């Protein structure tokens, strides 16, 4: 057993007394995705948040989780959020992975009720543009905006293909990613043949939609064929499993471009790994360094190897910054309310302050007890929240290897295009 985990367990053994001595528990609600199109993500995001919570507890801040399933469904998630806020009286909420869930939950529940919510994986650019008087600075995320990812996707596509068709989930995430990709791809000389939205649910077949990508048409410009060089898969795993397989079986598709939403080894196993070998995609990456190394070691101690599911480190960071902010509020004698925790978020995660890496919460709490500033650098990268509650992060290019395994290809640091 690793030294870091032994220290953690030894501290937890004395936790009952310590938590009583230093103050109230922190009650956190989660809206992770255990069913619906993103059901592959929820269990892993929950594990990461629980790892951070155990480490925070070992340092002196006990966390009580109240977990609810978002269903990757706006209506279901809004009802669950209402329970968390009005019945369970949580101090903060983590989740969902889906922008199509996070946005309506924020608009209808958390922001109107002055509830802090941090999403580890809702990347829609639209979230940045929600009016400040609607957000009231209660909506944050530990993942970057798709305004970054789409630029890298466009550059990648233009380096490999001349024409593309795009299938995308018809919510704020899919719309923003697809249309910014189109802009970036066309800016580099690419031609987008078809932009094809589909519903947020999981359909039994997408053949009707796929025909729009694989049926030749004429235009006033030179002939454009539906036999596009590549089909862009800007959807969630459960949807992509259906239509990628249909594209292969019914239209002989052989080239695909993926994104964070469709980054899934289970997808490759479902359609046949040989069909996706060598295909590439993008996703918000993690910055290599001490913080990620700590997280990776602790995750392996607790759960085994880190899977390829996106945003696991981001879920850890969401819990970490909530815990650090809560402790900072408690040191100041403030009750653990959503507003008080929100008011400390940037203070514990932005410069200046002593560098704090993932898992080193005892050091952070000791510094806060002394009235000193801390700067948490996340497992996923910098967690320096801007005025809109956003962070910047590297964008990873990945590919499917032999057997369907997902492997890193390169990392790009990118800014949004005008």
Image (cartoon, rainbow, N blue to C red):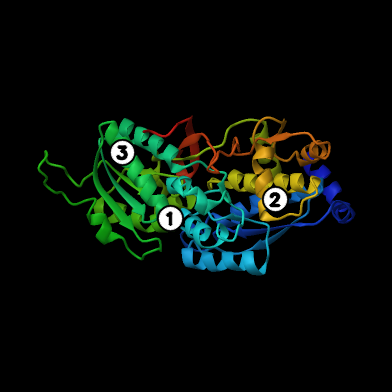
Q: Is label 3 in a helix, a strand or a loop?
A: helix
Q: How many C-alpha atoms fall within 10 Å of the one at disc 2: few (<14), some, or many (≥20)?
A: some
Give the left or right position of residue 73, taking residue 359 as reference: left
Q: CA distance from mark 3 to mark 1?
A: 31 Å
The residue drawn where x is 58% and y is 67% is 82
Q: Which residue is mark 2?
A: 340
Q: Quadrant of residue 205?
A: bottom left
Q: Which residue is mark 3?
A: 183
The residue drawn where x is 78% and y is 34% is 372
Q: Which residue is mark 1?
A: 270
Q: How many C-alpha atoms fall within 10 Å of the one at disc 3: few (<14), some, or many (≥20)?
A: some
Q: CA distance from mark 1 to mark 2?
A: 46 Å
Marks 1 and 2 in Cβ contact (< 8 Å): no
The residue drawn where x is 73% and y is 49% is 326
Q: Which mark sits nearer the N-terminus, 3 or 1? A: 3
Q: Which mark sits nearer the N-terminus, 1 or 2? A: 1
Marks 3 and 1 in Cβ contact (< 8 Å): no
Any part of residue 340 in sight: yes
Q: Is label 1 in a helix, a strand or a loop?
A: helix
Q: How many C-alpha atoms fall within 10 Å of the one at disc 1: few (<14), some, or many (≥20)?
A: some
Mark 2, mark 3: which one is toward the viewer? 2
The answer to whether 93 is drawn above or below residue 191 in the figure is below
């Amino acid at each position: 057993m690793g030294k870091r985990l032994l220290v953690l367990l030894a501290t937890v053994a004395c936790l009952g007394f310590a938590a009583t001595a230093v103050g109230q528990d922190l009650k956190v609600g989660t809206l992770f995705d255990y069913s619906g199109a993103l059901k592959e993500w929820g269990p892993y995001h929950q594990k990461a948040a629980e790892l951070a919570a155990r480490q925070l507890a070992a340092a002196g801040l006990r966390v009580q989780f109240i977990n609810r399933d978002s269903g990757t469904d706006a209506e279901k998630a809004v009802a669950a959020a209402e329970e968390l806020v009005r019945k369970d009286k949580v101090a903060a909420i983590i989740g969902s992975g889906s922008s199509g869930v996070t946005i309506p939950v924020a608009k209808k529940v958390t922001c109107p009720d002055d509830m802090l919510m941090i999403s580890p994986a809702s990347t829609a650019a639209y979230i940045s543009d929600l009016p400040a008087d609607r957000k009231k600075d209660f909506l944050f995320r530990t993942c970057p905006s798709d305004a970054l990812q789409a630029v890298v996707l466009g550059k990648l596509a233009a380096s490999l293909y001349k024409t593309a068709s795009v299938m995308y989930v018809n919510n704020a995430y899919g719309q923003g990613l697809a249309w910014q990709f189109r802009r970036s791809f066309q800016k580099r000389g690419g031609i987008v043949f078809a932009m094809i939205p589909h519903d947020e649910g999981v359909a039994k077949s997408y053949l009707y939609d796929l025909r729009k990508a694989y049926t030749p048409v004429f235009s006033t410009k030179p002939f454009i064929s539906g036999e596009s060089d590549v089909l862009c898969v800007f959807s969630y795993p459960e949807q992509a499993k259906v239509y990628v397989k249909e594209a292969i079986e019914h239209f002989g598709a052989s080239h695909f471009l993926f994104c964070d939403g469709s980054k899934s080894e289970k997808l490759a196993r479902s359609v046949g790994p040989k069909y996706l070998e060598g295909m590439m995609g993008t996703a918000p990456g993690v910055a290599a360094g001490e913080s990620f190394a700590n997280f990776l070691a602790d995750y392996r101690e607790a759960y085994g190897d880190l899977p390829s599911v996106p945003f696991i480190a981001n879920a850890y960071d969401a819990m970490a910054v909530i815990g650090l902010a809560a402790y900072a509020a408690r040191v100041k004698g403030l009750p653990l309310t959503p507003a008080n925790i929100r008011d400390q978020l940037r203070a514990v995660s932005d410069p200046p302050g002593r560098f704090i890496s993932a898992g080193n919460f005892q050091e952070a709490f000791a510094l806060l007890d002394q009235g000193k500033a801390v700067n948490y650098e996340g497992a996923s990268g910098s967690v320096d929240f801007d005025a809109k509650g956003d962070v910047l992060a590297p964008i990873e290019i990945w590919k499917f290897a032999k057997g369907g395994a997902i492997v890193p290809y390169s990392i790009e640091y990118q800014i949004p295009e005008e």
